[in-house]
Structure formats: C-alpha cells, structure tokens
Amino acid sequence: LSVDEAREDTERIPRAIEHTAAPNSVCLRSSLILGPPVPLRNGCRKGFDTFIQFISSRLESAAPTVYYTNEYRSVVHIKDVVRAILHFLSIALSNNEQRGSQVYNLGGTTRASRYDIALAVASQLK
C-alpha cells in the first residue's frame, strides 16, 4: 500500500460506522500504544513483544536499525486506553440516550517519531 492508500484505509472504518445498523456505536482509534510487555509470546507479527521491546533488543545487540524521523505518532499508554474503554462502556451501559455514532482518536498530547522513541528508550537503558 502507498501512504495515501493506507491513510484512506484507516479512514474507511470510522466513516462506515456512520452508516451501520448500530447507530450508537463508538470507534476508538489509537496510534502507538506503549506499556509493559504483552502477555502472549511473540505478541506482534514481527516476532517482538512490542515496539519498545524491539528497540531494546536492537540496542542491546548493537544491531544497526533505521528509525523513521519523518513519520509521527501520538503515543498513548495502555492504562489510558483501558480507562477510555471503561469510560465509554460505562456510558453505554448506564445511559439509554441516543448519541449517534462517534469516533475518538486516543492519543497523547505529544507527537513522536520512531527515532524519538528509540532515543527515549536508549536513555532509560543507560
């Protein structure tokens, strides 16, 4: 996929929610979720638990790695994602009010490139 095709793909689901049979649905979108290692072995498709564990393993082995500097993500901690999910669940379970379909982007207040994140992890490993 090109960058434009990928961007279009990520916008398709939120737009589709507006036209579903579930008129009071909520879509929570995240970018880069940080937190402790996942409880499953090989938690992501590349064989590393999380992006932070990938960075850590590359730094510890001194393996050359390219970290993008021209792509930015809004970083969010897993605890904040869980809080957001619980918040919207409590609203849905306690309120029969018709709200319509809603899309929320879950992210922090700071944008970071993969390079920025690698630098932060490296500074913690010293």
Image (cartoon, rainbow, N blue to C red):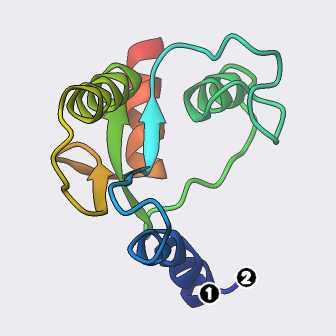
Q: Is residue 124 left or right of residue 60?
A: left
Q: Amino acid at mark 1?
A: Glu
Up/down of 9 relative to 52, above or below: below
Q: Locate the N terminus and report the quarter of the image it occupies.
A: bottom right
Question: Which residue is situated farthest in the front direction here?
Answer: 96
Label 1 to label 2, Cα distance in Å?
A: 6 Å
Residue 88 visible to the viewer: yes
Q: Amino acid at mark 2?
A: Leu
Pointers 1 and 2 in contact (C-beta within 8 Å): yes
Up/down of 35 relative to 65, above or below: above
Up/down of 36 relative to 16, above or below: above
Q: Residue at x 31, y 23 (%)?
A: 86
Classify 10 Å Cα crowding around label 1: few (below 14), some (14-19), many (20 and above).
few
Q: Is residue 119 left or right of residue 102?
A: right
Classify 10 Å Cα crowding around label 2: few (below 14), some (14-19), many (20 and above).
few
Q: Residue at x 48, y 38 (%)?
A: 118
Q: Which residue is mark 2?
A: 1
Q: Position of residue 6 (x, y in %)?
A: 60, 78
- The label on residue 5 is 1
**Who is closer to the viewer here, 50 or 65?**
50
Residue 126 visible to the viewer: no
Q: Locate the C terminus and report the quarter of the image it occupies.
A: top left
**Who is closer to the viewer here, 40 or 101?**
101
Up/down of 70 relative to 125, above or below: below
Res 102 quadrant in image: bottom left
Q: Secondary structure at mark 1?
A: helix
Numbered-mark total: 2
**Who is closer to the viewer here, 51 or 120?**
51
Q: Position of residue 45 (x, y in %)?
A: 81, 41
